[in-house]
Amino acid sequence: MAEPVQTPHAFPTRIFSGIQPSGGLTLGNYLGALKRFVEKQDEGIETVYCLVDMHAITVWQDPVRLRQQTREAAAGFIAAGIDPARSILFNQSQVHAHAELAWIFNCVARMGWMSRMTQFKDKAGKNSENVSLGLFAYPALMAADILAYKATHVPVGEDQKQHLELCRDIAAKFNNDFGVNFFPITEPVIEGAGTRVMSLRDGTKKMSKSDPSDQSRINLTDDADMIAKKIKKAKTDAEPLPSELDGLADRPEARNLVNIYAALAGMTPAEVVREHAGSQFGSFKPALADLAVSVMSPITTEMNRLMQDVTEIDRILGAGAERADAIARPIVNDVYDIVGMIRSR
Ligand code: AMP
Ligand code: TRP
């Protein structure tokens, strides 16, 4: 049998990331993902950002709301600083390479790998017989999203780490099975204080668009009053802030608010506690609320303005999809050739 050829081959730096339009964007999405997408774009790196509508339908989505949420997420991206001229911004279903490569990867990934995915186990819970097959296959579609562009770096929040390890495993197995060095072994980029923003009601749970309590999260559509109210009501403890981070080790809610402050202010959590050492939450929360409003409000206002013209949003997504397709199509065609499919039309 031929030895797999792993000739060193440098892949040009390309960033890919995605967000599900399965609800409104949250402060967690903003700090863990969106804000960092903008930073990468502004560093001048090639950036491809995708609203993953096909991932969204792994759980039930009302069709009218799905369209609305996809446009709203696009508006949120642009309002947060994604420039559709510099970044490629589109919705997943308009670029067929994603679904096509996902099928190939369904045949590369092993049942055992997929069964270990903690997000599937959490989402399926006791109901695992009754969730969609798509929810189980979800990480293979995610690997297809990334590898259809041979993306080398993927900025995400902490919760996506395991899915990115699976993407690396799929790329390595594909390369090895076919004796090629075709796909890069993509690096996750999980950095900064906002990679795991927790619920405002429970410091041990991730802030999520799917949490039944709206009080648990800040939405990108919340107005200034609402943001301030939610922060002031956020669960905390009775202790003042310590001067060192060690003092927050067993205080998940306090730690979360310090992290949020740090991520919003562009500081490290250690700098935040140094600056606010000894503060009670009675004074720290209003300071945090002011900071959150000053960062988020301009984004919300701009997002609402952009939503006035959905034709323009759809045009931007269509133009982005064409640029995305121009990169992904030849890559997926090469995959068909490598796998042994006849292409004769
Ligand atoms: P999703 O909303 O699940 O599609 O997530 C889109 C992106 O936002 C991914 O990179 C997630 O890791 C990130 N993200 C979602 N929720 C949070 C959170 N609470 N804290 C930090 N990042 C998050
Ligand atoms: N699974 C990611 C999430 O829920 C969203 C996603 C889909 C994604 N495809 C991706 C993120 C590709 C990064 C790269 O957060």
Image (spheres, grey):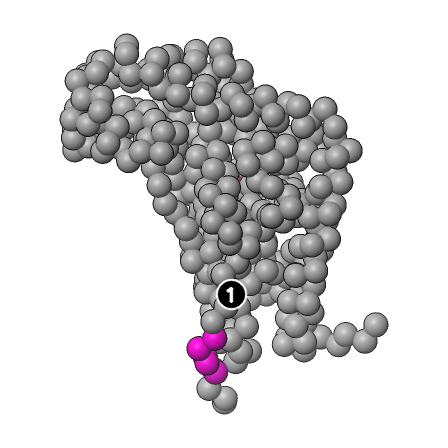
For the residue pair 33 and 101, the one nearer the viewer reads as 33
**Residue that appears at 74% across and 30% down:** 310
Question: Where 13 falls versus 300 (above or below)?
Answer: below
Question: Where 83 falls versus 227 (above or below)?
Answer: below
- Image quadrant occupied by the C terminus: bottom right
Judging from the image, what secondary structure is the residue with disc 1 in? loop
**Residue that appears at 52% across and 80% down:** 179
Residue 296 covered by magenta stretch: no
Q: Is residue 35 left or right of residue 233?
A: right
Residue 155 in percent (x, y) is at 46, 48
Q: Residue furthest right?
A: 345
The residue stretch that appears in magenta: 5-9
Residue 338 in percent (x, y) is at 63, 76
Query: Which residue has dot 1 on it?
Result: 12
Disc 1 Cβ-to-ligand 2 distance below 8 Å = no
For the residue pair 206 and 219, the one nearer the viewer reads as 219
Can see residue 207?
A: yes
**Residue that appears at 24% across and 17% down:** 237
For badge 1, the amino acid type reads Pro
Q: Quadrant of residue 103?
A: bottom right
Circle 1 Cα neighbour tier, 10 Å, few/some/many (<14 / 14–19 / ≥20) = few
Question: Where 209 falls versus 318 (above or below)?
Answer: above
Q: Quadrant of residue 253?
A: top left
Residue 130 in percent (x, y) is at 58, 40
Question: Where 63 falls versus 153 (above or below)?
Answer: above
Predominant SS of the magenta segment:
loop
Residue 72 in percent (x, y) is at 64, 30
Can see residue 121?
A: no
**Residue that appears at 19% across and 32% down:** 245
Counting every numbered tag in the picture gives 1
